[in-house]
Image: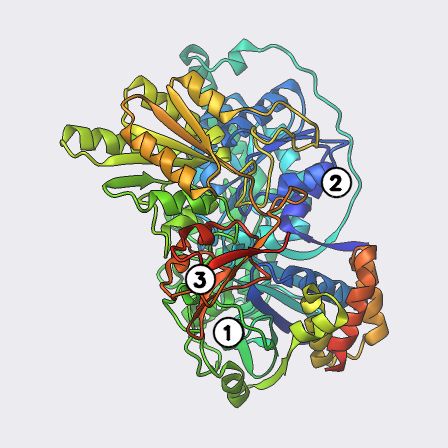
Amino acid sequence: MKKIMSGNEAIARGAYEAGVTVAAAYPGTPSTEILESIAGNYKDDIYCEWSTNEKVATELAIGASIAGSRSLAAMKHVGFNVAADPIFTVAYQGVNGGLVLVSADDPGMHSSQNEQDNRNYAKFAKIAMIEPSNSQECKDFLAEAYKVSEKYNIPVLFRVTTRVCHSKSLVEWGERTEIGHKAYEKNIAQRVCAPAFAKPLRPTLEARLKDLEAYSNQSPLNTVELNDTKVGIISASIAYHYAKEVFGDKASYLKLGFTFPLPMDLIKEFASKVDTLYVIEELDPFMEEQIKAAGIQCIGKERIPNMMELNPDILAQALLNETRETQKADVALAPRPAVLCAGCPHRGFFYSVGKKKNTVVAGDIGCYTLAASQPLNAMDTCLCMGAGFSLALGMAKSFEVSGRDTKVFGVVGDSTFFHSGITGAIDIIVNKGKVIPVVLDNRITGMTGHQENPGTGKTLMGEETTRIDIAEMLKVIGFKTVRTVDPCDLTKMNEVIDEALNSTEPFAIVTKRPCVLIKGLPRFKTKCVVNQDKCTQCKMCLKVGCPAVFFKEGQCTIDPSSCVGCDVCLQVCKFEAIEKVGE
Amino acid sequence: MKETKNILLVGVGGQGIILVSNILAAGLIKVGYDVKMSEIHGMSQRGGSVTTQVRFGEKVYSPIIGQGQADVLVAFEKMEAARWVEYLKPAGKIVVNNYEIPSITIASGQAQYPQGVIDALEKVFNTTAIDASQVAQEVGNIRTQNIVLLGALVKALQFNEMNEEDWIEILQENLPAKMVDINIKAFQQGYKL
């Protein structure tokens, strides 16, 4: 029977069927559901965990491979940057149990800070690459990925994109193949990449890539569909389906599933059979450049954009000059950006810090990045995971040497603190940085949909575990004063921020209140309403940027169905016009 | 059915759009269609504009719907209907919830909620406006709005292969037991509209 599955669920199923026994990840859209699905469905057969960050997840998977397991690490595209260090060297070392690294790229930046094309990593790190185009292929190609990894002694980059991860299509299931564990044997020359051992491994990698190219030309993942030969299309991943949508059976196709090393003989042969050759790929001209370098004429990025998500409309316009008839409605639309939820604990901190003059807030990746938008405007920077502390240190040092007295806050979430904030916090202490680090501890990894982190006290497999205390860690690192505060209590929040600004010793803040969306936690018992008799319509309550508080028909109003009763709006009202109701 | 049909579901994060898409897909699969769906997770869910797309037919390639291509647009919030109408075929249908959720730009007074949305839609498109929140309240749970809209959508699809009872069976198969009864009521009310 066929089941409808997302690409991520199909990758999880594929890992199960391929006999994987160890899987690890750090959550990140669009990759998160891979490990969630493994934990939800296959944890009896696959050990799985949320690792502290992507580098830890990757090294864990490498270790499991060396020890003899088929293993998998999954991450979003920018997470692959974090994990890059071990990947470049494990390519020299090779594998024992099959090793697959899933990179989930986000063309169009639906939920990311950039849209880097991680196919380049395969060429850069000299590892094999497989790209499925739908859920069935996510499952089936993963089985082939493990065979390739073990046969050619190479890690496989399993590259997917948002539309592959988060679109759902029908999948025919198979059975799990019990591979068992390979024997572990100590092999210093292969596993210890000191220069003396790395040098002889280096040429073996080139030899393995040659073998892989021969495989690529024969791979069942690379298929030719000959129709009319006036137009030939080379494509891979989701772009193949867009091409099929636009050209149907009026063109011939070379659909590539094994995309590094490219099957250049197969490509030459296909090119010789068609009059015009298009290379249709999302983002960079990854295939096109290699194909052109091999002396094959083709049309690609001169017509198809090299940025943002591709779709059939863009292809039809670019290659066939076709557009579809559309109609508009005469409505003046208001933008609907994402917003911190009603009752979000981050609101209290950002509202308070946003009012402090002559301060800078270096932010980080998470729900709290939304505090940069209107009306809070309470963040100066957001770059990457962990930069909240270390980038803040750089700003503080620059202000110091230039004699500017601006105070710098470095802000990270709890999961981000464990991911890569800790190293920055240590740097602040050791190098005497004038930064006030703030950890927004909401007990969970929020933005990606509530994954456990080292502060949660639970593992991905559902076991109780050590809950790491962030405030204690900051103390151990060397912050003389660490204040833990409920960010929804604006008076206390404000006092703590002032205390930090006036402190001459290293001072850190932990705001502590669970994410309002965590199920099963005690809620606020009351809700807020506006007493219109007292309200002067000063609109102060709108400044907290809560989606439950709005101005309608000349009145400040609170929507009872979305208010959760955090009462941050009540605390900013100078006229006591916001009251609590219910118990 | 040779031609692929396209249904675009739009609304605001948290309105239960993904559940409706899943139930719809389950029904289409049961009939034997090839089905593809696409949705976006992550940041945009936090009160932002969200969409899921369902395509079905003999063989479906792209999981996403192009401009001017949707047969039916189901809007869980009325301004969102207007935001996505360019994806509708000129002869396509709109099923719109006559329900208003102000965005943060409106809430904080930087923008206005547009007036006359339903009229503007009706002028150009074959539009069915329904008051799903009121119907859901009458049924007994405001959170069944999404299933009321599913009922209205299924009706608008004029989908001969499945009748009301068949869809109710799909609901039973895809909802937690304690939620089934109230959602069947919501579905029936939506189907009547």
Secondary structure beneath dot 2 equals helix
Q: Is A118 situated above or below A474? A: below
Secondary structure beneath dot 3 equals helix
Q: Is A252 situated above or below A283? A: below
Q: For label 2, count other residues whose C-alpha is less than 10 Å away and answer few (under 14), some (14-19) or many (20+).
A: some
| Mark 1 vs mark 3, CA separation in Å | 13 Å
Q: Which mark is residue B104?
A: 3
> Which mark sits nearer the N-terminus, 1 or 3?
1
Looking at the picture, how far across and down is residue A103, in whole percent? 52, 41
Looking at the picture, how far across and down is residue A174, in whole percent? 78, 44
Q: Which mark is residue A101?
A: none
| Mark 2 vs mark 3, CA separation in Å | 38 Å
Name the residue beneath numbered marker 1.
B79
**Residue A65 lies in what quarter of the image?**
top right
> Would residue A141 appear left or right of B79 to someone viewing this image?
right
> Would residue A406 appear left or right of A531 to someone viewing this image?
left
Name the residue beneath numbered marker 2.
A41
